[in-house]
Structures are given as structure tokens and as C-alpha cells.
């Protein structure tokens, strides 16, 4: 494709993005473990929210097959609608009767259980029939994570498709919201949208940017890849979930990437600094400083600039912005790596190197020195993993299937077949493992182990690209270096 034609296509897509900009709106989610009371709803709506997310608590609404108890949900929906707020009904959790088990489950297992798809479709359709004239938005679950729906992605996709089909069969104009697992999980989203067509497809995809630690720029990069390589041209629209801990910054990052609707978790209020933007529309962006980017928003008679910090800090809204702005969303791209190999930076400071991620659960390590040699030492009992991030500018969302060779250099073990490791990595179609590798004996020698991966995706599915796993070993791993090399296909 010629550069001129590519430039024209990019310009057209940018103009369409801005032309379709929806007004900014904030929403709050009420308690997920029950149907909220009228008082809960009144408090949420009084805080400036234009959307209220209400759990249509399935065990309460349908305590048994064919038995429907809508009184509590009716009261909550009517209370929210009376304030003028738009209601979102969230499906789930699974009632005990809709789950098949070989033995009696615990309450926690039921709360995370996979429902029967047909039962879910009937429940979703019943909600749509009862509330279609009051409620336009139906969220397919709280989130497809192990804490709320402990099933494999393909089963989640099937459940989503069944529920969406049930809702759209009642009224095709109703809006189905599909939440993703978190961190802008590109492969999960691609697999889901590839299988969900027609009435089974969602109208809105809800992103959860901060389930795993993401910088503002990393979030924008994933959104750019999502729009360019995953989303079909006809949608779905994008919304975002603002995290509880870093809600203001990540909410601002979503707004500045033309994601207009933000939902805040139970107990969290809409950040006052962002409230002036409600009702405005995204107009473009502009660089502000080395540490911040500005998103420009407009109403019929006012313009605002939302300054978004790229790392830490709080966003700020400046009224009366009169300058020009750039169309489309902020232009971000990772640092490009042209070499065919990247090596471990034990300090984690080089954006063009392989970086360890000690902040992820189970992944803390100790940096020590053996002579002048820096070594990362795992904690086999409490932190048996070493999480690693491959630079996005080297290889990211590797749908083309470029094979890689991973080389691990580490000190040997004291005893044979008592200490070892394998790799758990982000792969095409899901997470994957390599075979177990025992360490050679020789505690003062450095040994090299090479593993070839033909299905590496490296899209940070669980907040990292791969990890060294040493669970069950007698000794800690003492890692000298890890490299990733791209191979010819």
C-alpha cells in the first residue's frame, strides 16, 4: 500500500472517530453481592452519576427454575429511573440451582460458578422483557475473572453469546455491555468478537485498564492496537471501568483516548476534578509537557483541556482552552527495538530490554551480586515466579506467529533433579507452558538452557509476557540472564 493511500485511510478513520464522539458520562456501580436498596440508589444518583449500574442478583430474582421475584429489583430500577439516571442491569451471580456439581459446592464456588447457558439466556431475556421500556443497558457479568466467573475463556464467550442473544431477541435496540477480563486483553477480545455475530454480538465492550499495572501510555498503546487490529469497523463501542485505587488517572486516560463513558466501582465516587467534562464531547489532543498529554473536550459554548499524567500524578481540567488540537487519539508507540534479540535488564529501567516485574503477585525477587555479577534470586516458598515483560517495540500481539528462542542462564543446583523451572507464557489461544527443565548440578557454575516457542503472543495477557516458574523446587533460582530472540518463520 502506498504511503499516500495509508495516510488517507488514517485521516478518514480519525475523522470518523471524532465525528462519532459521544458525550462524556460517568456512572457508578452499586454493591455486586446483592440488589441495592432505594437508599443506595438515591445516594449514588446524588453524586452526579448519569449511569447507575445495578446488580440484577440472579439468586434473588430467580431463586428456582420458573420462580421469579422482581420486587426488590423493581424498586431499585424505579428509584434510579426517577432521578433521570440511565440504568445498567448487571447479570449474575449464578444461583445454586443453575450449576451442576459432582459434590455439594461451597458458597464461594457457587458465586464464581459457570451457569447453564440456556438458563442464563432465559434469565437475561426475562430481565429484558420486564425492563426494556425503562432500562436500555444490560451488562453480561460483573467481570470474566477467577474472582467472579471461574471458567475458561471459550465457556465465558459462549455464556456471553447466549445472554446477548436472549436480550436482543426481546428487543434488538437494547444495548448489551460485555466486560473484558482486564488490562485490555487483546487475544480474549479478538476470540470473543470473532465468535459473536448477529444477535450474539455486544453493542459495547467495557475495558478494565488497571486490573494489571498499566501506565497511561501503555493503556493508550493497547487501545490503539485494539482499534486498529481487533475491533470490526462497525463496533462495538468502547467504555471503561475506572479502578478503585488509581481511578482518576486511568479514568482521565480513557477519556483522552475518546472513550466517553466511565463506570466507577462500588464505594468509589466520580472524581470531582473530572465532573466538569460530563456532557462534553471529545475533540482531539495535544502535547502539554514531557510528563502530560492534554485531551480537548467541547460543548456548544465551552472548551476544556484535560491534562493527563503519563506516569504518576492527578489529572486536571482547565476551562476555556482556545488553542488548536490534533484530531484523533494521542499518538503513542513503544520504543522501537530493531535488534533481533533483547536481554534482561536486572534493574528494570531500560524500556528496550527485558524487564522483571516484581510488583506482580508471587513475583518478588532479590537482586544480589556474586562477585561483580548481578543475579536475581527467586523465593521458592513465597514468590516462586519471575515475571518478565518483553518490550512492546520488539514484539507485541504476535498474531503473525514469529517464533522466538528464549535462553535462560542461571547457576546450577546442589543436587540432581531437585530444582528446576519451566516457562508459563502468553500464547496464541491462551496461556501455555513449556516442559519442566531440571537444573544441572554445579552451584558455582552458570548453565544455559534454550527453549523455542512457536506460539508466543506476548500481549501482556495477565500483566506480563512470560514467567519462570520454580514451584516445588528445593532451591531458589539464581538467574544471571534471560534473552529473547526472534527467529525466521
Image (cartoon, rainbow, N blue to C red):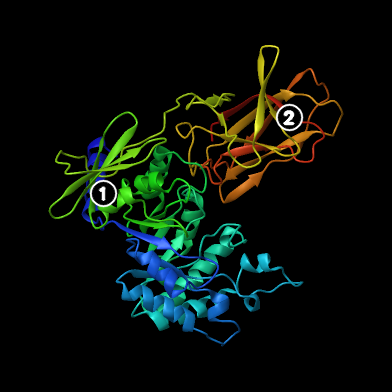
Name the residue beneath numbered marker 2.
477
**Do callouts 1 and 2 mark residues in contact (Cβ within 8 Å)?**
no
User: Which residue carries the number 1 mark?
Assistant: 13
Observer-nearest of 182 and 266: 266
Left or right of residue 51: residue 105 = right
Earlier residue among tags 1 and 2: 1
Q: Position of residue 184 (x, y in %)?
A: 46, 49
Neighbours of disc 1 within 10 Å: few (<14), some (14-19), many (20+):
some
Q: Residue at x 76, y 72 (%)?
A: 102
Nearest to the observer: residue 322 or residue 115: 322
Using the rendered image of the protein, determine whether residue 32 is visible from the camera's viewpoint: yes
Q: Is residue 365 left or right of residue 53?
A: right
Residue 432 in percent (x, y) is at 64, 46
Q: Residue furthest right?
A: 415
- Residue 369, image x, y percentages: 68, 17
The crowd level at tag 2 (other Cα within 10 Å; few <14, some 14-19, many 20+) is many
The single residue placed furthest to the top in the displayed view is 372
Location of the N terminus (image quadrant): top left
Amino acid at each position: 500500500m502506498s504511503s499516500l493511500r495509508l495516510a488517507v485511510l488514517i485521516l478518514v478513520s480519525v475523522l470518523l472517530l471524532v465525528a462519532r464522539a459521544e458525550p462524556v458520562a460517568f456512572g457508578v456501580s452499586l454493591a455486586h453481592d446483592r440488589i441495592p436498596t432505594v437508599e443506595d440508589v438515591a445516594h449514588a444518583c446524588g453524586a452526579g452519576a448519569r449511569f447507575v449500574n445495578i446488580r440484577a442478583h440472579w439468586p434473588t430474582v430467580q431463586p428456582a427454575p420458573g420462580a421469579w421475584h422482581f420486587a426488590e429489583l423493581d424498586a431499585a430500577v424505579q428509584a434510579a429511573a426517577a432521578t433521570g439516571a440511565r440504568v445498567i442491569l448487571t447479570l449474575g451471580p449464578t444461583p445454586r440451582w443453575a450449576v451442576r456439581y459432582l459434590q455439594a459446592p461451597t458458597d464461594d464456588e457457587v458465586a464464581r460458578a459457570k451457569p447453564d447457558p440456556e438458563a442464563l439466556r432465559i434469565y437475561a431475556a426475562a430481565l429484558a422483557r420486564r425492563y426494556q421500556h425503562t432500562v436500555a443497558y444490560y451488562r453480561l457479568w460483573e467481570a470474566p475473572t477467577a474472582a467472579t466467573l471461574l471458567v475458561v475463556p471459550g465457556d465465558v464467550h459462549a455464556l456471553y453469546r447466549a445472554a446477548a442473544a436472549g436480550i436482543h431477541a426481546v428487543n434488538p435496540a437494547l444495548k448489551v455491555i460485555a466486560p473484558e477480563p482486564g488490562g485490555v486483553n487483546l487475544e480474549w477480545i479478538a476470540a470473543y468478537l470473532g465468535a459473536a455475530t448477529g444477535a450474539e454480538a455486544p453493542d459495547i465492550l467495557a475495558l478494565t485498564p488497571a486490573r494489571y499495572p498499566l501506565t497511561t501510555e501503555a493503556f493508550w498503546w493497547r487501545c490503539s492496537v485494539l482499534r486498529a487490529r481487533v475491533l470490526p469497523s462497525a463496533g462495538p463501542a468502547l467504555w471503561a471501568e475506572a479502578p478503585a485505587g488509581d481511578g482518576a488517572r486511568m479514568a482521565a486516560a480513557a477519556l483522552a483516548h475518546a472513550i466517553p463513558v466511565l463506570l466507577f466501582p462500588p464505594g468509589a465516587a466520580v472524581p470531582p476534578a473530572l465532573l466538569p467534562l460530563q456532557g462534553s464531547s471529545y475533540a482531539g489532543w495535544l502535547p502539554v509537557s514531557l510528563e502530560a498529554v492534554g485531551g480537548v473536550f467541547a460543548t456548544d459554548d465551552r472548551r476544556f483541556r484535560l491534562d493527563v499524567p503519563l506516569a504518576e500524578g492527578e489529572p486536571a481540567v482547565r476551562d476555556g482552552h482556545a488553542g488548536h488540537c490534533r484530531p484523533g487519539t494521542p499518538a503513542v508507540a513503544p520504543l522501537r527495538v530493531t535488534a533481533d534479540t533483547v536481554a534482561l535488564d536486572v534493574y528494570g529501567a531500560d524500556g528496550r530490554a527485558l524487564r522483571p516485574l516484581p510488583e506482580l503477585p508471587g513475583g518478588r525477587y532479590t537482586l544480589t551480586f556474586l562477585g561483580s555479577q548481578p543475579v536475581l534470586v527467586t523465593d521458592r516458598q513465597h514468590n516462586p515466579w519471575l515475571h518478565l515483560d518483553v518490550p512492546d517495540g520488539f514484539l507485541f500481539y504476535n498474531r503473525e506467529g514469529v517464533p522466538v528462542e528464549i535462553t535462560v542462564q542461571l547457576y546450577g543446583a546442589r543436587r540432581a533433579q531437585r530444582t528446576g523451572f519451566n516457562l508459563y507464557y502468553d500464547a496464541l489461544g491462551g496461556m501455555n507452558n513449556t516442559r519442566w527443565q531440571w537444573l544441572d548440578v554445579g552451584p558455582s557454575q552458570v548453565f544455559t538452557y534454550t527453549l523455542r516457542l512457536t506460539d508466543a503472543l506476548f500481549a501482556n495477557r495477565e500483566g506480563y509476557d512470560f514467567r519462570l516458574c520454580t514451584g516445588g523446587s528445593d532451591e531458589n533460582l539464581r538467574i544471571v540472564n534471560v534473552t529473547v530472540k526472534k527467529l525466521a518463520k
